[in-house]
Structures are given as C-alpha cells and as structure tokens.
Image (cartoon, coloured by chain):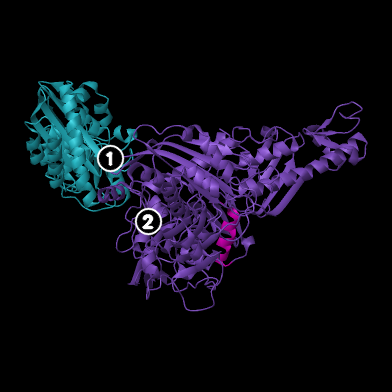
Amino acid sequence: MHYVAPTTVGEACSLLADNPGSRVFAGATDLVPQMRTGRLEPSVMVDLKRIDRLMSVSHADGRWTIGAATPASDLTHNAAFTAMHPGISEGAGLIGSDQIQNRSSLGGNLCNGSPAADSVPGMIAAGARAVIAGAGGERTIPVADVVTGPGQTSLAADEFIVEFEIDDPAANTGDAYLRMIPRTEMDIAVVGAAVRLTMDGDTVSAAGVVLGAVAPTAVRVPAAEAALVGSSLDDDTLAAVAAAASAACNPIDDKRGTIEYRTQVAGVLAKRAAVIAAERAQNGA
Amino acid sequence: MTATENPTNYKWVGTRPIRHDGFDKVVGKARFGADLNLPGQLHGAFVRSPHAHARIVSIDTSAAEAMPGVKAVVTGDDFPALDPTHPNYDTAVNCMARGEAFYHGHAVAAVAATTKAEAKAAAAAVEVEYEVLPAVLSIADSMADGAPLANPNNHTKFAPPGDPSNLATITNLARGDVDQAMADADVVVEMGFDCAHVHQGYIEPHACVVDYGDGKANVWCSSQGHFRVRSMTADVLGVDNSKVKVVPAEIGGGFGGKTTIYLEPIAAKLSEKSGKPVKITMTREEVLRGSGPAPSAELRIKIGATKDGELTAIDGWMAYGVGAFSDMAGLIGAMSVASYKFPNLRMETYTALTNTPKSAAYRAPSAPHAAWAIESVVDEIATELGMDPIDLRLKNAAVEGDLTAMGMPHPRVGLVECLEALKASDHYQSVPAEGTSRGMAVGFWFNIGEESSATVNLNEDGTANVITGSPDIGGSRASMALMAAETLGIDVYSITPIVADTESVGFTDVTEGSRATFATGKAVVEACEDLIEQLKARAATIMGVDVGEVAWVDGAAVSPGHGGGEGGDPLTLAQITAQAKRTGGPLTATASLNAAGAGPSFAVHCADLKVDEETGEIEIVRYTAVQDAGTAIHPSYVEGQMQGGSVQGIGWALNEEYIYNADGAMENASFLDYRIPVASDLPLIETIIVEVPNPAHPYGVRGVGETGIVPPMATIGNAVKAATGVRMTSLPMSPPKVLKRLNER
C-alpha cells in the first residue's frame, strides 16, 4: 500500500486515474476503521489535505465555498458561517468527537455514503452543490445527487469532490439539524432530520425537510415541505409534518435501531427541527 | 461526604493520601498488559469459530505454516486432554476448542509470526472444516423440552449422575409457608423480567507476553489474580505450578472479567513451539466476542405484603443464561436475595447453558439481575400501599441475625443506616426538579474473604516495604499502605506498597469478591502487629528492660525510662531499625490467612431523571449512591468504587446489551455499537459513605467494590415508572423499548 499527498487537483486526478483501487481521503476517520476491519484495502491512499483549494473556506458573491477536505471544526468554529447556516454547522459538530472533527470533513462525510451522515441532510436542505474534479475536468451537481446508496456515490473512480458551494439564504431563513442517538455523543445517528424554513412574518414561505438514517440515502420529504409552506407551524401542521416524515421512511432494522422506532422518531425530530428553524428564521439567524 | 463518621480517632485510616502508584500512572510510566515487549518476540493471532455451535471436522494448518514470518501454529491437539471432571477442564476448552466449537468467536487455533500482520494473515489461512450443529441461543431455548445440548460435557451440579443437560444448576431455597403467606397477604405483586448479556467493558483488552524456556513458562500479563493465572495456565499446559511464573502488570480494569484466562497457555505453547517469546493482545472485537460477559436472565418475582407494609413472602423463579460452560449463576442469584426479612421464601433457580461466550464474573455476579426484579416489585408494592419507598424498606430491612435466602444469619450489617442516610440526604429531601421523577432501590453483596499473604520488611532507615499478591485494581496499594501506617505508627509515604510476582510472595487469591482491602489488608495488619512485637523486643534489648515493660505508642517503643513515667524519650521505629544489626538482624514479618468474616455491604441508590415521551430517551439529572463501607480506609477510592459501580449499572440499565443475529453471532462487537455510557451521559454521581464497622476486620473494613452495580437498574426503572406510569421489565431500557411501551400505554 502506498500513501501519496498531492498538492494540486490535477495531480490527484492523475493518481486516481493511473492507480486502480486507489482511494482519496481527507480526515480518514471513516477510511482507517474500514481498513482496520479489513473492509477496504486501497492500493494507493491519496491524501487531499495538502491541496489548498480543498482546505479553504471563503465567502464571496453571495455564497460560501467550502473546501471538501476542510476539517469540520473549521466550520463549527466559523462564527459567520454558523450564523448563516446553523443547521449545517451543528450537523458537522455532531460527527464523532472534538478530536474527530479536527480531521473529518464535509466531503468525506458525504462520500463515505452512510445514510446516517450528520452533515448531509443540512446541506441538501440548503441546496448545496458539489464541485467534482476528474480526469475529464470539473462538473457541479447538487449534493443530493452525490450519494446513490449505502457506500455508493455517483462519482467515477477518478473523481473526487473539490469543494461545496452553499448560497446565502434568503432573508428570514433559519435551519436546524437534530439527530437521535441513544447516548449524548460518540455515536451514529439512528435518525437525523434537517429543516430549513424561510418565514414571512409568522407564515412559512419556503421549506426544506431532509431526513437521514431512515432510508438507503438521505431523503427529502416534499410532503412535509408542502405541509409547512403557508402554515404558521400550528399543531395540525406539525402533526402533518411528523406524519409525512414518518411516511417517507424506508429504514432497516439493525443493531442501531428498529424500523418501527426510526419511523416514529423521524416524525418527532422533523417537527422539532421545524420549530427551531422557524425560531432562528424569525430571530434573524 | 461521609454520613456516619467512624468514632475511632485514626491518624491515617480515613485520610486521602495521593496514591503511591499515581505518578507512574499519570505520566504513562506504569506498564499495563500490552506494554511489555521482549527482544525477538513474536505476535500471536487466533482463528475463531464462525459458528455458534459446530463440530470441528478437520483443521489444516499447512498453508498457514508456509506463510511468511510464521513460526508456530497450535490447535487443541497441542494441549493435554484433561479429564472432564478436572476443575479447569472448561477453562482449557474455552481457551482452545477440542473437537467442538461452542460459540461464535470460540478459539479453534492460533498462530505466532514475526509481525502482527503476518500472524493475522496466517490465521486467515488456517483451513477449518466445520459440521454446523444446532445452537441454543436463549434461556428459553436452552430449557425447552428436547432442546439440543449446548455442551455435551455439562452435567447438572449437585444432582445424581445422569445424562448431560443444558442446566448447570437447579436449586430450590425455601423457608416458611409461601403459599399460605401469599393467600393471607393484603397485597400481592407478581412480574416477569429479563436482562440481556452485558460486558464489563474494561478499557484494557486482555494481553500477555509469555517466554517459554528451559521447561518453564514466564508470563507477564494483567489480571485480577496472577496466582490463578498460574494455576490455570499450568493445568491447561499439564505442568506443575512451579513451571509457570506470572509477573503481574498494572491492570486497566477487570470488574470480574479478568478472574480467568484466555491467552496465557496459548501464548506459552506458541512460545514453546517457536522458541521465541510470544505476545498476544486481544482486539476490542475479540474481547467482546471471546471473553466473558455477565449472564443473561429471565426472572419472575412475586411478593406478598400486609396492608401496613410488612413483606411477608417472596416467591421467585430465576434462570441465568451463562454461555456454553457450567456455572453457578442461578444459585448465586438466589443467594443474593438478602435485603429483607421475608419470613416466607421460595427461590427456584436455574443456570442454563447457551451457545454464547462463557460467562465471567461481573461485579457482584448474579445479584444485579435479581435486584432489578425484586426491587422493581417492592417499588410496586410501595405504590400500591401508598408508602414512601424508603419507609417500606426500613420496615423490612434485614438486620443482624435475620436470615439471607441461603438461611445464613446476617452478621452486623448497615442496610438500615444506609436507608436512613439516603432519607436524610439533601437529594432525597429535595423536591425533584421540574419535569423529573425519582426512584430508589437497594443492593446487597455478601463479599468474600479467601486466602491472602503479606510480607512487611522494615528498612534500616525506618521506612517499610509492604509486599502483597493482590493486583491493585481500585487503589489497594494506597489502602495497604494506610493500614500499615496506622498499625506501625509511621508516615504513609514512608511505606512502599508492592504487588509481587508468584515467586516473591505467598499464595494470594484473586482480587474478587471485594476482598483485597479486607483480606489482604488483614494480612498486612497481622504482619505489622507481628513486627510491633519484634520491635518491642528489640527496644527492650536496647533499653535494657524487660519486654513486658515496653509498649508501642505512635510508632515508638515506650518504657518507664523512655517516654514513660520516669521521663526520657521513646525509641522510634527508625531508631530501632537503625540498630537492627546489633539486636538480631533485619526486621521482617509475614502473615498468611484464609480470612473469615467478610462483612456484607449494602447500598441504596436514588436517581432523578427525565423521560422524553416522544423518543423514549432517559436523561439522568441527579444520582446519589449510599453505601456501607464498614470503615473507609481511603475514602476517595471507596467513592470511586461507588461511582464506578453506579455508572456501570446505569449503562446496563440504559443501553448496554449483546445483540445476536439469528446465527448467534454478536452484531455489535465494538464500543461504537455496544453502548457504554460516555461522560456526558452522566451527572456527577454523588456519594454518601456509611460506616458500620465490620467486627471481623481490625479496622472494620467491608469490601466496597461490587455492591454499587446492584441497585442502579431498579433505581432507574422505578424512576421511569414514576415519570411515565410504565413499568419497564426488560433490560436494557433502551429508547426503542421505552417508546414501544409508552405507545402501548
């Protein structure tokens, strides 16, 4: 096995194209455990953290550009980003532990392909885009289109994510991400729910609802969004949001949670996240 | 805080010196099981059964032996066949299967190679042909009519010779007339309970290095008792104890799980075959799959009471699932029923074999299961009678002379004092915070004495070395030094407490049963008392007086002319040791004993918690543990034991469980998915030490290491009932289970 740390995107693309079985990584917080248990044996490990573009965070022209290998803690400690996208920041702040967050990245969290990835529902709800580099050049697609199933992405073998683009939210917008784990930290989401709301006074004018850990990929819940838009988050609306979220679930029974439990709690978290998102929207978060 | 200060005015006992082994542990110099490396050592790796129960048709090691770096491969055939009645037969078979694998993860072969990676690769190349056999995976399956045998070598203990059975024990304890008492009772509550397998979760995986040479196995390992490692290893290898030397490493947690062996004879045989030292370190996955969790249990408890709260009868049925080898968990569970007077009692218990890992001890083994069920039912009775749960327990609490389930009268015990201490506590006197509810429960553990040795050597400058054979798991070095300092009358820091190897100190049983500070401590005190007699004799020689005129006061010899009635100065211990050469030579003493009179320790716990009724999550916001320590030699380590037991019990209550798939393989063999509590899950565990001295120990010590894990499950279950009206009856009370019960409400 070989370890390489290219310093340009082009170099990294060439390494991937030239070495079948190679693998890019950022924090390696998923890769190393997978290698330890024998699930993965990359021929070449390509470290993306030496490429400046993948390690930078910038805000210009009404959007954030976040290097795909940037440590989660760079986002959670970025007050301006967190003020604008608190739901994405709090998702990134739930990955593993503080130590893990000094390594783990949005790009890795997404491309690991886990349906339980904590930073993903918030990015999808925000309409984030992924800039993907490959031997054939760069392309940009919605984050929602990256993961196709557990451990599976739409990226070609020679491609990797360079950066994410997240547009500044409309005025009076707030988001929130909640997850259920049986402990308070150091665990994997049994259910995750991100909600992004734009408010017009007490009325919801736009909504995004995305669930994690309840289907093979993170899932958007249009029925919950429809229930929210035009409402003032009254009890009937929240009940409808919960019912729609539960109905959107297609989870598995496993050691981390049951189908029955995940389905019910997805509804609970969706409505709770909606309430927080609305408060943030109205408080100018 | 300490509720009942010991009336005796000790100088050292009851103080909190910095532990003698603390510096090395803080700076990382202390050497734990995996920290020793020998020149030229090889690394061992296991081949483990992928089936819960299978006949081993053949093992082909030729491909593995031909792999790079491989120096030795062993299978069950490399070890002597012990007679099935040999006390360590099961241990030998558990270390390495002989013709039949009894659980998923059971070791069937092992290899030693130059690197860990080579050993792992070679283990994967060992070809084992299995014939899969029917597996027994639950207590119900094990006890069903016509069930397949989990282990054909198991015969029911204490029963007439007969066919093999899945039941290791069937016991009935009874007194009085339970049926009549139930018929006469004003209130009768009967409920069923169950508990999943749980693991001790010690942070240090099992590890050893063995260097076999000149017919002798030299073993370095961490364990709760190196003398037991010696005898078990010797028996598995078929050699005398004198052919095994065990040097104890520091131990990173045991909680009962390191009272047996898994690695040492395998490493010894690999070392013998390869001619090189062999190191084996378990992975966390191996620890969970291949060491000894606590038993699972199914329990049914019926308790009758009068309308004024007298508990008149208990009728219990308890079955413990202990894995694939004989055990006495059921009987011990029944023996742990000892908190209340119960004039009428019937406990029917079973120990059932399953094709899961062989159970090992876990802090007050078997008692937590029984207390979970009984204390839940007692709580229901308090609710039905409208009585305060402490008052109901005070009315029925066992005191000296009351009988345990085994029919043994209690010695002086402190349950009443513990209940009164909780009742008077700031916690119990407070109103539960908004949105929280409260529960409390009692726990009992009998503790044991067993054999210990201690040698105390006085140095020529008046300092002392205290040498014992008890591994220091919970601060016992500091406790030994404190008792020696108190007895001899010298400074605690002038004493060096040492845990010596199997060839440097007299035989000492395992650190289990909360016995080290009690039994080994008693040996230390006896050795120090012997030294005081010697010191007095030497002083008499120096002073030129009759030894009968010499007394030992505050670390010095006093006679009429030396600090006594006629003035002069006492002769200090250091002054006497300085003159040892001319008064008869070095001063040293050894004491060995089989300690009787281990005092039982009661605990009473109280929790305030919140239940999220939409997600089933339980948040513990306040927790208090009260326990009778007899005398707290080093209160910090007593509190540490109380807090540690509480936390492990909280984990057992909330989320910890072995999750098996349909084939009997553990699905959650990692600390990610075997969910022990993390620090942020817990409030500060408040402690109240109660001191009702044990008359059988010179300083009144009762063991404190185990009882703390007994009350938490019912404490939390009782608080959940108070919060939601739902009585949880299945452990763990994980969010999915709680939510399901709330939905059914």
Amino acid type of the residue tagged 1 in the rendering: Ala
Q: Give the residue drawn at x 11%, y 34%.
A: A208
Q: What secondary structure prevails in the magenta region?
A: helix
Q: Give the residue drawn at x 16%, y 48%.
A: A216
Q: Which residue is mark 2?
A: B120
Counting from the top left corner in percent of width and height, residue A13 is at: 15, 38
Circle 2 packing at 10 Å, graded few (<14), some (14-19), many (20+), is some
Counting from the top left corner in percent of width and height, residue B9 is at: 70, 33
Mark 2 belongs to chain: B
Cβ atoms under marks 1 and 2 closer than 8 Å: no
Query: Looking at the rendered structure, which numbered label has been put on residue A28?
Result: 1
Q: Secondary structure at mark 2?
A: helix
Mark 1 belongs to chain: A
Which colour represents chain B? purple
Residue lying furthest bottom: B162
Q: Secondary structure at mark 1?
A: loop
Report which quarter residue A139 is drawn in: top left
> Is B370 rendered above or below residue B557?
below
Counting from the top left corner in percent of width and height, residue B569 is at: 86, 27
* Residue A74 falls inside the magenta stretch: no
> Is A176 rendered above or below residue A246?
above
Point out the stretch of residues depicted in magenta: B222-238
Q: CA distance from mark 1 to mark 2?
A: 23 Å
| Residue B222 is at least partly visible in this image | no
